[in-house]
Image (spheres, rainbow, N blue to C red):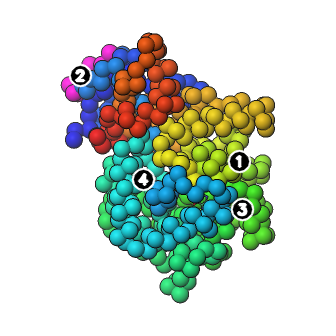
Amino acid sequence: MNRSFILKGNIFHTPEPDRLAVRENAHVVCEDGVCRGVFDIIPERYGVLPVIDCGDKMILPGMVDLHIHAPQFAYRGTGMDYELIEWLDNIAFPEEALYADADYALRAYTQFADRMRASATTRAAIFGTVHAASTLILMDRMENSGLVSYVGKVNMDRDAPPALIEDPAEGVGADTRWFIEESERRGYRHTKPIITPRFVPSCTDALMEALGEIRAEYDLPVQSHLSENPIEIELVRQLVPRAAFYGDAYDRFGLFGRGSNTVMAHCVYSAPPEVERMKRNGVWVAHCPSSNMNIASGVAPVRRYMDEGLRIGLGTDVAGGTSESMFRAVTDAIQVSKLYWRYIDLDAKPLTFPEALYLATKGGGSFFGKVGSFEEGYAFDALVLDDSAESTPRPLPVRSRLERAFYLGLDRDGLVMKFVDGERVF
Ligand code: GUN
Ligand code: FE
């Protein structure tokens, strides 16, 4: 499709965390997949572009999911009566072991990618499993989905069932190299590999060292988990006594920012030295409120991180998180921040709706470049949302309509168009 056009309707975006820009009956211009801004009247230079009139519908930037596990999608909404380590042993690992079977992987990843396509998510950072061949199947499915994504072959070589432990006899990191090279050979346009140590408890120093070398050699981004749960953090202390703090155990191997885009999920318990290092190294936080509730990890101090100037986005963390819905992640983030404020820190003001929307768009979008806003020069990732089926006798201002669409989960039935880099997904 031609990637130059204009959408007309009620346009929203968050150029700054505390500013929801609302333009009713306005135009947002896409030229060669790049946003040229929002205008009340179409500038003459864009006069030749076709206009898609969305009427009274709402137009907003696509959502960025900074942390999701594709192989866990199959059991989402089940197995929630555990904390992290028990949940991994009893729920996540047994399911992930099934992905040694390519037929199972194809079926499961097709369902996952179909749902991602239909969702409000336009970009995502995704975990596969340890299996390189199955994770390539995931990449194929994601490439077809129309989303832009990073997909990681998970690395783990200790403290898991034998079926999920990498075989060092093949050379530490050898299958990760194969995965990267094979994914590059396939020439995907929207789907790129990302270095993915599962978390420190799953990775020996030898594996971390190999991943650090591979990361530098191929110049790839990194994703992992950090300071999610007290038992996990104590485990890291015992396993890597030399590390000054959890994040230092990644940083020692060149897997914690400093030139490479790195996103760490959770950061519920990051103490000031870890926060300071993340800030200095430019590490992104993927805040995953649904997961943090379900497996009882706690509430991340997002207000403090925002005040400190950390880079932050939102993740669904399916299937610690219940749902792939980023609309739900936005409202969950607001709701848990209210409990944090009320029960833990009266100085940590709750997140507002514009702030949470910012995290889900421009905040997480920055991991992918100029993404998540309708400012000039940003990638044109957009959603068109129809809320008319959810009727109300009271005429609502458009800003309230947008907020309501998030709280009522209208991303499930109300999305009528989705664009990524100016390409129409549906
Ligand atoms: N830490 C290590 N692996 C996982 C996982 O699969 N989910 C979550 N939430 N945390 C983890
Ligand atoms: Fe996770």
Q: Label for residue 232?
A: 3
Q: Is residue 126 left or right of residue 258?
A: left
Q: Which element carries disc 3, helix, strand or loop? A: helix
Q: Label for residue 298?
A: 1
Q: Which element carries disc 1, helix, strand or loop? A: loop
The x, y position of residue 214, in whole percent, is 52, 70
Q: Residue at x 57, y 28 (%)?
A: 353
**Would you name the residue on which mark 4 appears?**
149
Query: 59 and 100: which one is in front?
Result: 100
| In this view, 79 is above or below 173 | above
Q: Label for residue 82?
A: none
**Would you name the residue on which mark 2 appears?**
47
Q: Is mark 3 within 8 Å of ligand 1?
A: yes
Camera-side mark, 2 or 1: 1
Q: Which element carries disc 4, helix, strand or loop? A: strand
Q: Which residues are drawn in magenta? A: 41-50
Spatial CA span between label 3 and label 1: 13 Å
The x, y position of residue 12, in whole percent, is 45, 25
Magenta highlight on residue 44: yes
Spatial CA span between label 1 and label 4: 28 Å
N-terminal-most mark, 2 or 1: 2
| In this view, 420 is above or below 92 | above
Spatial CA span between label 3 and label 4: 28 Å
N-terminal-most mark, 3 or 1: 3
